[in-house]
Structures are given as structure tokens and as C-alpha cells.
């Protein structure tokens, strides 16, 4: 098991309920394939440059522990999910 940190920027164009459901989808996916260590919701922030004609995004950082093959699957799901503007997963050394 290894430790990872993933940051996702989701669209701010949807209502708060839909944004929470999108984040919960990924929390449940990570929890099913490992353990969540912490969730840090940064909230809505202005983007440095427009992404898909959007100027704001909702930032969420999740630290988790999982098998080394899971982050590739998580990245694949981020890319095909509507509402996720950007994501990045890195290994954390402690």
C-alpha cells in the first residue's frame, strides 16, 4: 500500500448539490479501493486561465492510501467524467 494525494478541479457552473455529488462519487470510489486519510475542500477559486470557457472551479484535495495500480484507474475515470476540469494524482513520501 502506498500513499497518494489527488487534486481535482470541478466545474463551478453546477449547483452546490450537484458539485457535492460529484466529489462524493470520487470519495466513494477511493474508499472502495483504499482508505481515505483526509479530504480538504478548498472551495471555489478563480482559474489562472479559462478551461472550457469557465473561469472558476471548485478545488478538492484528497489524501489516500491504496494499491499502486489504483491511481491509474482513478486518473482514467477523472478524464471521462463530465464536470471534472482538471485532476492530478501524485505519490506522497512520508
Image: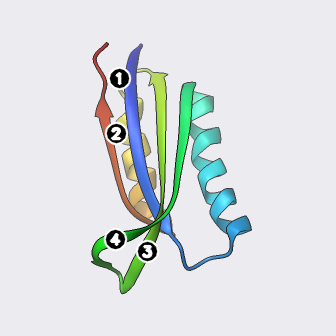
Crowd class of label 1 (few under 14; some 14 to 19; many from 20; radius 10 Å): few
Cα distance in 3D space between marks 3 and 2: 26 Å
At which x and y percent is residue 48?
27, 71
The answer to the question of whether label 4 and label 2 lie on touching residues, with beta carbons closer than 8 A, is: no
Residue at which label 1 appears: 68
Q: Earlier in the sequence, mark 4 or mark 3?
A: 4
Above or below 91: residue 74? below
Residue at which label 2 appears: 72
Residue at point 63%, 64% (across, down)? 19
SS state under label 1 = loop
Residue at which label 3 appears: 56
At which x and y percent is residue 27?
60, 41
Residue at which label 4 appears: 47
Above or below 16: residue 33? above
Cα distance in 3D space between marks 1 and 3: 32 Å
**Viewer-nearest of labels 1 and 4?**
4
Residue at point 39%, 34% (across, down)? 5
The answer to the question of whether label 4 and label 3 lie on touching residues, with beta carbons closer than 8 A, is: yes
SS state under label 2 = helix
**Viewer-nearest of labels 4 and 2?**
4
Cα distance in 3D space between marks 4 and 2: 25 Å
* Left or right of residue 91: residue 79: right
The answer to the question of whether label 3 and label 2 lie on touching residues, with beta carbons closer than 8 A, is: no
SS state under label 3 = strand
Amino acid at each position: 500500500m502506498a500513499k497518494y494525494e489527488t487534486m481535482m478541479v470541478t466545474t463551478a457552473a453546477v449547483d452546490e448539490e450537484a458539485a457535492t455529488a460529484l466529489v462524493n462519487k470520487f470519495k466513494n470510489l477511493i474508499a472502495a479501493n483504499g482508505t481515505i486519510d483526509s479530504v480538504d475542500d478548498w472551495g471555489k477559486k478563480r482559474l489562472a486561465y479559462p478551461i472550457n470557457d469557465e473561469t472558476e472551479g471548485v478545488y478538492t484535495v484528497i489524501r489516500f492510501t491504496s494499491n499502486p495500480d489504483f491511481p491509474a484507474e482513478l486518473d482514467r475515470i477523472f478524464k471521462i467524467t463530465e464536470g471534472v476540469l482538471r485532476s492530478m494524482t501524485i505519490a506522497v513520501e512520508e
